[in-house]
């Protein structure tokens, strides 16, 4: 399973999928991750997430404070997952078998795949809007074009994604720098605000923290996938900080930009960005739309790639076969791409409200998982795993882990009274004026329960004759 079989580290089309990456295929340096995550996060769904934080009664200043807090916290968890990649040489979600058991890990995989599809659908709609603005192509046709391009990048896999994100980083950084200057100039120039708000409101402020947190945390289930080819000797600290810098700077920047944009302009973020870009001339508007389009199909390549890896992990849990190279990749990638594109068509009529609800629900589902995974890696096992046993249903991690599954379920249940979204608002959330802090509760409860359960299990094993 671990042999390279004539493969080269500088591959054009990736042959590996969810198996361990052999040491002879390891390559790259931790600074590569800064470009990957900066480029991946400099895209329209992040602007939309920032726009979703703007709510009645909350000033832009307080919105910015909430966004910064959410980004700092969400990125802390996300980058901590990234640091696992070089050490283990595994995709993130297959490593969850150590916490949930061989079959138990299939449970969070379902939510992870749904998360990928939702992020993809939001991105492809926004990208298609930019493509329509640039070329006049109908929105539905734009969705299909971007889906095809994203799928092609995902088919090539790891190395192409890394290279593409590096070059994209320079372009989108330059474009958004100019856009930010133009937006600030328009505001100081006395442009009327489309959504004027002032003061502090608890519920909207908590929302302004939660939405950015989940936008950053959304990368957690596959962030290690893009570090797993790095040499095993790569330091945890360097992987953490390069990842944190790339996704943290881009996330805070674009979400603050999106919030300011939403307060000054009516309509969706694509139209508003076009209006801002026109201040520098039609030539810059065209470049802006091109950068937005490239950003969307690059992040959606990651979403398709992640959904493919997670779907493959789920299926091979019950049917243990995951070799097959390109044929296997296509067998999973193409159905995922088709389903994601279909969801994009469903998303396109009410994007911002739907996206906000989706983000809050995803955070409730993912926060218990992230706490359990990080507690296990950093506090319980301290990075020591038997990689071969992760692929064995009768291995040392068991078929089902009572500690992992029960900690997840109890942690999720503990969140319910704190939830606030279009589907349900709990009693504590109502007392907080609609503020949603359920994800904080989920992290604390699940992490604490898992830590206690695993330490008791370890103590029992040590004391048994």
Image (spheres, grey):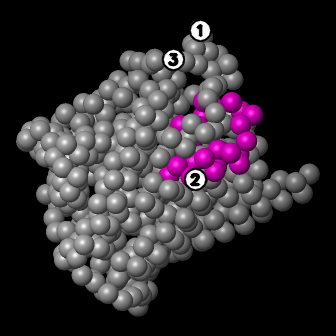
Which residue was labeled with disc 2?
Answer: 244
Q: CA distance from mark 1 to mark 2?
A: 34 Å
Q: Nearer the viewer, residue 407 or 161?
A: 161
Is residue 370 among what the camera can see?
A: no
Residue located at (20% from left, 73% from top): 191
Which residue was labeled with disc 1?
Answer: 6
Q: Nearer the viewer, mark 1 or mark 3?
A: 3
User: What is the magenta range?
Assistant: 222-247
Residue located at (47% from left, 47% from top): 38
- Is label 2 in contact with label 3 (beta carbons under 8 Å)? no
List the single residue furthest toward the right.
465
Q: Nearer the viewer, mark 1 or mark 2?
A: 2
Which residue was labeled with disc 3?
Answer: 11
Picture quadrant of residue 450: bottom right
- Residue 342 left/right relative to 295: left
Picture quadrant of residue 6: top right
Q: Position of residue 100 (x, y in %)?
A: 59, 50
Picture quadrant of residue 445: bottom right
Secondary element at tag 3: loop
Secondary element at tag 2: helix
């Amino acid at each position: 399973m671990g042999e390279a079989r004539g493969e080269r580290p500088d591959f054009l089309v990736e042959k590996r999928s969810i198996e361990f990456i052999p040491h002879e295929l390891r390559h790259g340096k931790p600074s590569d991750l800064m470009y990957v995550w900066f480029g991946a996060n400099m895209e329209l769904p992040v602007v939309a997430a920032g726009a979703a934080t703007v709510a009645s009664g909350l000033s832009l200043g307080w919105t910015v404070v909430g966004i910064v807090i959410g980004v700092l916290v969400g990125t802390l968890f996300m980058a901590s997952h990234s640091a696992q990649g070089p050490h283990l040489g595994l995709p993130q979600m297959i490593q969850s078998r150590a916490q949930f058991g061989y079959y138990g890990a299939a449970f969070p995989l379902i939510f992870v795949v749904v998360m990928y599809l939702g992020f993809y659908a939001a991105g492809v709609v926004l990208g298609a809007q930019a493509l329509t603005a640039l070329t006049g192509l109908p929105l539905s046709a734009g969705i299909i074009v971007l889906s095809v391009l994203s799928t092609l990048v995902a088919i090539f896999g790891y190395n192409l994604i890394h290279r593409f994100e590096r070059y994209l980083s320079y372009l989108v950084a330059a474009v958004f720098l100019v856009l930010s200057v133009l937006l600030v100039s328009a505001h100081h120039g006395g442009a009327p605000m489309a959504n004027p708000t002032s003061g502090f409101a608890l519920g909207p402020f908590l929302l302004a923290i939660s939405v950015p947190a989940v936008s950053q945390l959304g990368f957690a289930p596959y962030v290690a996938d893009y570090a797993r080819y790095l040499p095993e000797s790569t330091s945890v600290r360097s992987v953490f900080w390069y990842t944190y810098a790339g996704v943290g700077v881009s996330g805070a920047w674009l979400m603050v930009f999106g919030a300011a944009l939403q307060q000054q302009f009516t309509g969706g973020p694509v139209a508003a960005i076009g209006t801002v870009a026109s201040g520098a001339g039609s030539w810059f508007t065209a470049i802006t739309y091109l950068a937005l389009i490239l950003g969307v199909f690059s992040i959606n390549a990651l979403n398709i790639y992640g959904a493919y890896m997670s779907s493959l992990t789920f299926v091979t849990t019950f049917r243990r076969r995951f070799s097959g190279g390109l044929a296997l990749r296509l067998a999973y990638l193409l159905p995922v791409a088709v389903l994601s594109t279909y969801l994009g068509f469903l998303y396109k009529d009410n994007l911002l409200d739907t996206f906000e609800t989706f983000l809050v629900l995803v955070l409730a589902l993912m926060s218990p998982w992230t706490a359990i995974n990080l507690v296990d890696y950093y506090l319980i096992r301290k990075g020591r795993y038997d990689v071969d046993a992760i692929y064995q249903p009768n291995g040392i991690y068991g078929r089902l882990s009572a500690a992992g599954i029960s900690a997840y379920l109890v942690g999720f249940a503990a969140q319910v009274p704190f939830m606030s979204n279009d589907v349900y608002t709990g009693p504590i959330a109502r007392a907080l004026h609609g503020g949603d802090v359920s994800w904080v509760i989920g992290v604390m409860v699940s992490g604490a329960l898992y830590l206690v359960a695993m330490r008791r299990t370890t103590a029992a094993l040590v004391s048994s004759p």
